[in-house]
Image (tube, coloured by chain):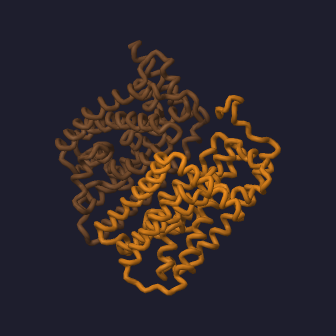
Chain colours: A orange, B brown
Amino acid sequence: MLSLYALYAKMDLAWLLRDRTFAVLAILADVISNLSSVTGIFLLAWRFDGLGGMNRFEVLFMLAYTTVVTGIFQTFCSGGNTGHISRRIGRGQLEHMFIQPVSLPMQLATEGFIPFSGSSNLISGAVMMGIALHNLDITLPWWWILSLAGNLLITMAIILGSSYFAACFTFYAPVQAEEISSFVIDTFGHISTFPLSGMPRYLQLPLITFIPTGLLAWFPTLALFGKAPFGLSAWYPLLIAIVIWLFAVYFFRKGLNHYVKKGINRYHPMGHRR
Amino acid sequence: MPAMHKYTATALTALRGQTNGGLVYLLPAIIVRLMYLLPLMFLWRVIADGETDVGMTLTQLLTYTYVNALLSEMLVVRTMASAWNYEGQLINLYARPFPIFGQLIAQTVGEWMPMLLVFSLPMLAIAPLFGISVIPVTGWFFPSLLLCISLGFALDFIFACITIRLRGMAWLGHSIRMAVVSLFSGTVIPFRILPFGLTRIFEVQPFGSLGGASLSLFVGASDPMRIIIVQAVWNIILWPVAIIWFAQSKERLVSYGG
């Protein structure tokens, strides 16, 4: 696995050095687009001295958390659409993976690794997080960083699990559902930038259960500061992540069985997709 | 009006293209629209409940966001130009006997219709239930909306030129555009409530004359004359840029995409 990571890192570096102009543009595009998407909420938090009981820098931390999560996703799951897996399925590209001498899970776990061109949001998010923590003026125990890492891992599991779960539709409706992973990831990502503190319970509860966007930044932020909402355990998101993955694995296998029998033929002989 | 027939036929084809598989295929777009609308509506309530002076009433904020959801396609126009360039289809438009911009505009207007009929119209009817006024505070909203749409097309064609220049990296232009426009158009967060004196700066930049400008007139949060003049000026500046740059870019169009 490590050798595959090293291989993809090498390929990513080669891409970066091959066309520096486009590489710089790609990195800037990532940073600009993500910072733009979180700036609006931070400006509101600044203007109104916090939002819904969260102070300015707690909101900044929450937005930094979102940015770091986006950065981790881009670093580990952006290459080859391994995160946006419905594209690979819908385009009939899983077949390409079947002929590789590496198992499908191993390919999915490693192929998306682009540490040089994809880590810009990880770095900018970490800087934002540092600024927020510095201004929060709190003393954190040494193990807090482990707790942060654990929360980030769980958040990633929720995003990926949701993407893979939704992508199961693509096995049966390849054209129509080709972009369903993007739909889920983008919509979840957008809603996750809203601090739910101060909002009514009938909005908060669905957003930490059925549509778990509140678990992608808001809940972990409060939990990391010892204020987990509704008196729930700080590890509640882990439970949701496990449930989502159980569904995702079950239906993905089912869809894959359908796929190997029916196939998805989207390409014309000349290379265009239907 | 035979001259108009080709445009109406294009628009109708685009309209049918959105609904060929049945109205159920509009459902994801409706869900996204609602998912974007709801948290913001509640956020305005949270802010209005605070002690700081917001600068706009809660009704104005709710109406602003609600009307944005109803008219979002018009407030920040997106044509198929960039996507078709990436997919190698844009060049096909040159085989048809009418102007490229005309085709793209007709296509876009046709694509607006299903969501306007299926989503916006019913939402308009139930708006009073949420305490939202669907009547604009000033009649200047309508000319402002026209200028906003016109500017939206000009900016879209300029972004298409950028996409043509970026060749295979078209998604770069797309990702920057989506994020920058959502912040700088003022459709999500009204400029009026921004800190650091950003209101004036954001109002005079070109994206500020898109949806945010018209919405601020709808809720009566801006001076109509100033908004209309700025919108007209950006139209006068950016349409020639779009026309000239697109003409210069067409030699770079590719016919093989995907």
- Hey, which quadrant is residue B89 in on the image? top right
Taking depth in this image into account, of B225 and B124 the one nearest to the observer is B225
Outermost residue, top side: B2
Can the viewer see residue A163?
no
Query: Residue at left 27%, top 46%?
Result: B205
Question: Where B82 falls versus A117 (above or below)?
Answer: above
Taking depth in this image into account, of A38 and B106 the one nearest to the observer is A38
Outermost residue, right side: A261
Using residue A69 as the reference point, say whether residue B68 is left or right of it. left
Question: Where B18 falls versus B128 (above or below)?
Answer: above
- Residue B63 % position (x, y): 33, 52
Query: Residue at left 43%, top 67%?
Result: A195
Q: Quadrant of the C terminus of chain A?
A: top right
Query: Residue at left 31%, top 38%?
Result: B148
Q: Quadrant of the N terminus of chain A?
A: bottom right
Question: Where A148 falls versus A256 (above or below)?
Answer: below
- Residue B47 % position (x, y): 33, 66
